[in-house]
Image (tube, rainbow, N blue to C red):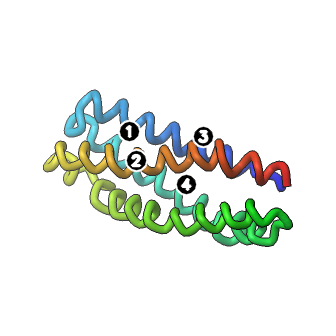
Amino acid sequence: MNIDKFKQQHVDILEGIATLRRLALAGVARNAAEIAQGIVAMSATIKLHLAVEDRALYPAVARSADAELARKGREFQEEMDAIAAAYEGFAKRWNNARNLELDERGFRDDANTVLRRVHERMQRENRDLYPRIEAM
């Protein structure tokens, strides 16, 4: 199975997270508009990525003759529900500059928690799931 698009979306999302981190370190209020725009752009990529995973990738993995891979795919899919919900809430809270300007500390705390989970999850997929899918 060719998963190059999934891998490229991971690269794009990880770059988005790195950009948000740089902007936040330079000052959340000072960079509020750019941070909000980055969240909106990254959200579009994440939504597309999750939708295609759910409609194509995970069903293909579930049909795999490799029972261990099928099990791992189900686990990854189920685990993603909570991460996706947390990210959706994060994006709704911080996708406008005014909210960022009003609660710089809240954004930093939320970003440290939610974006770390997204980042760690993608790294696990890249390391533990994608290589097995490519070998299918």
Give left or right: position of 60 versus 73.
right
Looking at the rendered structure, the kind of residue marked 2 is Leu
Whole-percent x, y for residue 86 in the image = 38, 62
Alpha carbon separation for disc pair 1 and 3: 14 Å
Whichever of callouts 3 and 2 sits on the residue coming sooner in the sequence is 3
> In which image quadrant can residue 29 be found?
top left
Of badges 3 and 2, the one in the foreground is: 2
Whole-percent x, y for residue 18 in the image = 44, 35
Looking at the rendered structure, the kind of residue marked 4 is Thr
> In which image quadrant can residue 63 be found?
bottom right
Give the residue at the far front of this rendering: 68
Q: Quadrant of the N terminus?
A: bottom right
Alpha carbon separation for disc pair 3 and 4: 11 Å
Q: Nearer the viewer, residue 92 or 120?
A: 120
Looking at the rendered structure, the kind of residue marked 3 is Val
Q: Label 2: which residue?
A: 115
Whichever of callouts 3 and 4 sits on the residue coming sooner in the sequence is 3
Q: Label 4: which residue?
A: 45
Q: Label 1: which residue?
A: 20
Of badges 2 and 4, the one in the foreground is: 2
